[in-house]
Amino acid sequence: MSILAIQILNSLFYASVLFLIAAGLSLIFGVMRIVNLAHGSLFAVGAYIAAWLVGRAIGFGVPAIWLLLVIPVAALAVALIGIVIEPLLLRPFYRRAEEYQLLVTFGLLLILEDLMRLVWGGLPLTADTVMDAMPVVHIGGLVYPGYNILVIAIGIAAAVALWLLIYETKFGVLLRATSQDRRMAAALGLNVGRVYVAAFAIGCFMAGLGGAIVVPSHAAVLGMGVEALVLAFVVVVVGGLGSLKGALVGALIVSFVRTAGIQFFPEVELAVLYLIAAAVLIARPTGLFGTV
Amino acid sequence: MSLLRTVELRKRFGALSACDGVNFTVEKGEFLSLVGSNGAGKTTLVNLITAHVQPDSGQILFEDRDITSMTVAARINAGIARSFQLVNLFDGLSVFDNVALSIFARDGKTAKIATLAANDGEVRRETREVLAEFGLAAKSELPAGELAQGERKLLDVAVAYALRPKLLFLDEPTSGVSSAEKAQIMDTVSSVVRSGAVTAVVIEHDMDVVFRYSDRIVMMHEGSFLADGPPDAIRANEAVASILLGISTPA
Amino acid sequence: MKAAAIALPRFQTRLWPYAGGVIGLVVLASIPEILGLYQTQLLTYGLIMAIAALGFNLLLGYTGLLSFGHSGYFGLGAYTVAFLLQWLGIHSMELYILLGLPIAAIVSALFGYICVRHTRIFFGILTLALSQVLYSLALKFFWVTGGSDGLRVPRPTLLAGMIDFAGSGGFPRFIRSYYYYVLGVFIVSAAIMWVIVHSPFGKALQAIRDNETRARFLGLRVRRFRWGAFLLSGTFTALAGILWVPLNGLTTPDVLYWPFSGEIVFMTLLGGFRNFSGPIVGGIAFTFIKTYAVASTEYWQLLLGTVLVVLILLLPTGIVGALSQIVRRLLAVEKS
């Protein structure tokens, strides 16, 4: 029974991370109509920055529990990177064919992957200290990291915060207006350019946050971004692109299927995921809650 | 037997009744204009008949056959074609290829993958004929996207005409062009259509054009027919006149 | 005066590709003499990628569908060769092609059936997901596929077993002969692709690309055409994979991994996806660019990514598009 509880918690942990990545991807697509192929790499950058900051902080003798602050700082750092990227690499391509926009994000992926290698080298970068700093929880005789519970809480908080932002704030109205009809929004006097940068920055923040919260549990390694992107795609395919609810539901489904897959069909666990994605698309061509 | 007959055709979009029990007949060989203010239901009626949209209820009979549940492809095979109000062309292909494709599609030749399109002499000849009839021969090598607006509208009609339909729907073939060009376009369209013995239904807003070229005028208002008859009868109709003059006032 | 200036460039621009093609072929035929063994090998890889890109562009340039999963077909071709060797002991290049293509066609037909019910973004994502299915299968079923180590494929026999490359001096002989073999296959497949895109079927694809609604209103069954294009496209790219693995000597799951699909997209857009020769130029150019990038720095992805971004900023219609513009402008200047 307690093993089941742990499996569920693990799934929720994984779902939190997936949700953050997928929601960011979905937001960027919903507002800017760009599929950001470098999104997974930004997730990886968040993980690396967080792990690196943890390493530095330990060097300065910062007490372990304060290390948790690294998480939002790393996420903000990735958001800042996004603010630099958008005008430099994305804006020149808005008028161009969609294919080229996609390709630019692919070029960005290549650049980011090697930048990570350049800055942090080929060895994994860990941040276990953060995980160890949190107390453990006892579940029916078994020990479970309290950190994972924190991650689940962060995931829920992020979902709520994002929902509030999009549906309850004035800025959210701007986001939704721009995503529904860009030209109309511009005609009404909305500064579409600024909305774009903001949406991209928020999307990057989410990706970075995902990386920062996962790294105490899974070390930052090269190639994690490329892998993460495919999973994010599976999530948005299942849940629907452009939908916050879709990202949440999709993340939960993918996560639980993956956990069950690892438990019962370890060889084909990944393939099962992709086939689920294909199956959902056959049944519902725009994903479960897709708006596109 | 009428060429086309609709029976109590209905279509609603939410609260708006675009077609309210429409009984529309078209006789073979007619050049018919469908007029009415914006939102009267003209385009919806055409969309229903050409299978762009499905009706809520009612029947569509073509040559006394029930085509209500037929797909777009089946209706085209039966002999119904249309052109579009917002020009719908294959901009990346040449003017020649736009029309040629129509003919390839009509003759069921589009599955041919091992022969060059340029080698089909029959198709090329017919394409040249159609282009000549529509006055587009000189521009045949240009990409369709590079034509002037008036020429694009003509090409749009030519592509539909090349299917050699029995019934051709033209959705505002003169919209968006200067008045000088309008006459040109309608001259060409009406002479080609009549000489080809194609029955035509034209949606049109320009009443000068309508009165000059039509055999029969049907006026729609808020989803149903208001008037139906030859141009003289319509001109004399009081109700029509008030609608025409007060065309901008909402119901 | 003006009429002449308009007439002549059109005549010349129509002749230019043919003349260029003939010259190109003569040059290509004498490559092993002109360049060394290494460059010949590189060009062979380039021609193989050109075939892959030609196949890919049938979907993108001519049908308007951007696939991000073509690594799947390339890898399928490569692994099929490895399996044919491992399970049936086949060494003949012709048998690799004759048996590999139908298998690729079946898989492409199946994947295509799933994918063409969607367009644009979801089409792209779905193609990516399906190629990842193949990738994860190749990785996980290591007792069949060799896992991440992959499978070795030694030099095949060419021309129904008449030519083999055992013994000393085998390697240089193989490189030269294989170059001509691939060149031959390339010419034949490029010719086939040329006929396909200029056939009534090809015109129908382009019409569907330009205006799906209108194509439907000509009575064309859009989904069926897209599926047909998908089948041909996947099979073509699989042919490239079949040709690739004997030269590379080894196939690994990397060739199925989705960034390789990205490279195929990259090379096609680099050359220009709106014309026939773009993918050919792009495939060859990309092979050389990537090889030199890998050789010159450990951080070749950074270099490649930057080159990519700069190139597509500067060349909106790819290399071939830019060259055509230059030629057209030169001709216009000459006439005036």
Image (cartoon, helix red, strand yellow):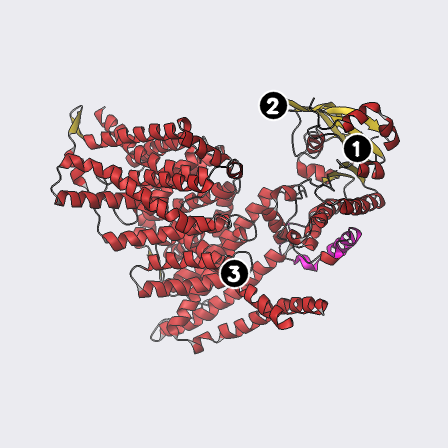
**Three-letter code, disc 3:** Gly
Kindly identify which chain the residue marked by label 2 belongs to: B
Q: Which residue is mark 1?
A: B63
- Dot label at residue C278: 3
Distance in Å between CA atoms under marks 3 and 1? 50 Å
Q: Which numbered disc flags the more N-terminal residue, 1 or 2?
A: 2
Vertical placement of residue A143 versus B83, above or below? above
Marks 3 and 1 on same chain: no
Distance in Å between CA atoms under marks 3 and 2? 49 Å
Kindly identify which chain the residue marked by label 1 belongs to: B
**Residue C226 versus residue A15: which sits nearer the camera?**
A15
- Dot label at residue C34: none
Q: How many dots with numbers?
A: 3
Q: Which residue is mark 2?
A: B14
Q: Residue B166 occupies which quadrant of the picture? A: top right
Q: Residues at badges 1 and 2 in contact (C-beta under 8 Å)? A: no
Dot 2: element: loop
Q: Residue at x 81, y 23 (%)?
A: B239
Q: Is residue B115 magenta?
A: yes
Distance in Å between CA atoms under marks 1 and 2? 32 Å
Number of residues whose C-alpha sits closer than 10 Å to that of mark 2, classed few (under 14), some (14–19) or many (20 or more): few
Q: Nearer the viewer, mark 3 or mark 1?
A: 3
Specify start and end residues of the magenta stretch as a single range: B110-137
- From the top left corner, tell me how far across and down residue A50 is, in percent: 23, 42
**Three-letter code, disc 2:** Gly
Vertical placement of residue A175 versus C148, above or below? above
Marks 3 and 2 on same chain: no
